[in-house]
């Protein structure tokens, strides 16, 4: 887990001044969930990873088997992660949330409006009949079909990934269940690399970005264009963009203000300021 430092009182006061009395939107990334024991992909202390590509998952049975084996191991810890003070501070602040995360922790914390841009790891979709089911149910089936696969990846370990996957070798004998309705291929209901975000979700995100007078980026390096495009539009439209992140981001040159500090610490102090 990365070591972060608290923001200065002056920085929090300036941030409160930018947001006070305005309609603003929080755009969050993996960095807000590190205090919940879920490591990020691209922070300065993140371990290099090679996430599965959508086309590989769809076309290659061995790639799917490898993914679900690692996901079964990682989910044993990932599913027990809960909201941290940063998530709860955003609830207290009452702002709508546009998140790039798939962990569902904003909704668990109680945020009234959350757009899960990249989907939710707690859901599973059949690629053939589009049936949705709960990831917990699939986990039970995976465990029953593969009783010899034991152990878990502890939350916060380098091998656990922010999408509930784990970095482990794959046994050739691992059994992947099929859709209970049609026998089709099951996939987590999240957007893989190389896959497009559903257009209705993108439309909902754009509506909120257009309505916001300011954009608060929390815990995202903005490396992926699906999040960066909103920041670029907001900056071009003359909206204030404030970034709270551990380390540099791809949009530092667009920001009205940058706070390089812990997300939980910063948001908690911001909530105190704006209470």
Image: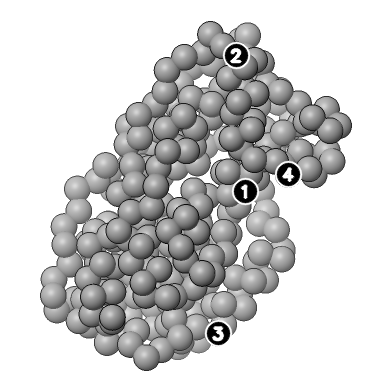
Q: Say which of marks 1 and 2 sits in front.
A: 2
Residue 90 appears in which quarter of the rendering? bottom left
Question: Is 76 displayed left or right of 196 in the figure?
Answer: left
Whichever of callouts 1 and 3 sits on the residue coming sooner in the sequence is 1
Between the residue at mark 1 and the residue at mark 2, the CA separation in whole angstroms equals 26 Å
Q: Which residue is mark 3?
A: 211
User: How many numbered badges does the structure rendering display?
Assistant: 4
- Quadrant where the N terminus lies? top left
Which x, y percent locates residue 122?
58, 43
* Furthest residue in direction left, as rendered: 9
User: What residue appears at the point 62 percent right and 78 percent down from the top-left corner?
Assistant: 207
Between the residue at mark 1 and the residue at mark 3, the CA separation in whole angstroms equals 25 Å
Can you see residue 111? yes
Residue 184 appears in which quarter of the rendering? top right
Q: Which residue is mark 4?
A: 132
User: What residue appears at the point 46 percent right and 21 percent down from the top-left corner?
Assistant: 168
Q: Residues within 10 Å of mark 1 (few under 14, many from 20)?
A: many
Q: Residues within 10 Å of mark 2 (few under 14, many from 20)?
A: some
Whichever of callouts 4 and 3 sits on the residue coming sooner in the sequence is 4
Residue 55 vertical placement versus 96 (above, below) = above
In front: 106, or 62?
106
Residue 146 marker: 2
Between the residue at mark 2 and the residue at mark 4, the CA separation in whole angstroms equals 23 Å
Q: Are marks 1 and 3 in contact (CB under 8 Å)?
A: no
């Amino acid at each position: 887990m990365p070591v972060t430092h608290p923001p200065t009182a002056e920085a929090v006061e300036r941030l409160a001044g930018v947001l006070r009395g305005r309609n603003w939107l929080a755009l969050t990334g993996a960095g807000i969930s590190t205090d919940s024991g879920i490591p990020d992909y691209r922070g300065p202390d993140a371990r290099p990873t090679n996430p599965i590509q959508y086309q590989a998952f769809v076309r290659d049975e061995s790639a799917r088997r490898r993914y679900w084996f690692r996901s079964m191991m990682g989910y044993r810890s990932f599913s027990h992660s809960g909201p941290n003070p940063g998530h709860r501070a955003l609830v207290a602040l009452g702002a709508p949330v546009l998140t790039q995360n798939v962990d569902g922790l904003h909704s668990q914390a109680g945020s009234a409006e959350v757009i899960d841009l990249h989907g939710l790891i707690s859901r599973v979709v059949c690629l053939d009949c589009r049936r949705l089911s709960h990831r917990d149910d699939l986990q039970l089936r995976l465990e029953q079909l593969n009783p010899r696969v034991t152990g878990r990846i502890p939350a916060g370990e380098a091998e656990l990934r922010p999408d509930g996957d784990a970095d482990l070798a794959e046994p050739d004998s691992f059994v992947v269940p099929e859709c209970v309705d049609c026998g089709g291929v099951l996939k987590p209901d999240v957007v893989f690399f190389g896959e497009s975000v559903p257009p209705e979700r993108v439309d909902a995100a754009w509506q909120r970005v257009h309505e916001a007078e300011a954009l608060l980026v929390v815990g995202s390096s903005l490396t992926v264009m699906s999040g960066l495009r909103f920041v670029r539009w907001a900056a071009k439209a003359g909206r204030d963009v404030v970034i709270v992140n551990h380390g540099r981001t791809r949009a530092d040159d667009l920001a009205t203000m940058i706070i390089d500090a812990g997300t939980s610490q910063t948001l908690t102090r911001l909530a105190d300021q704006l209470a």
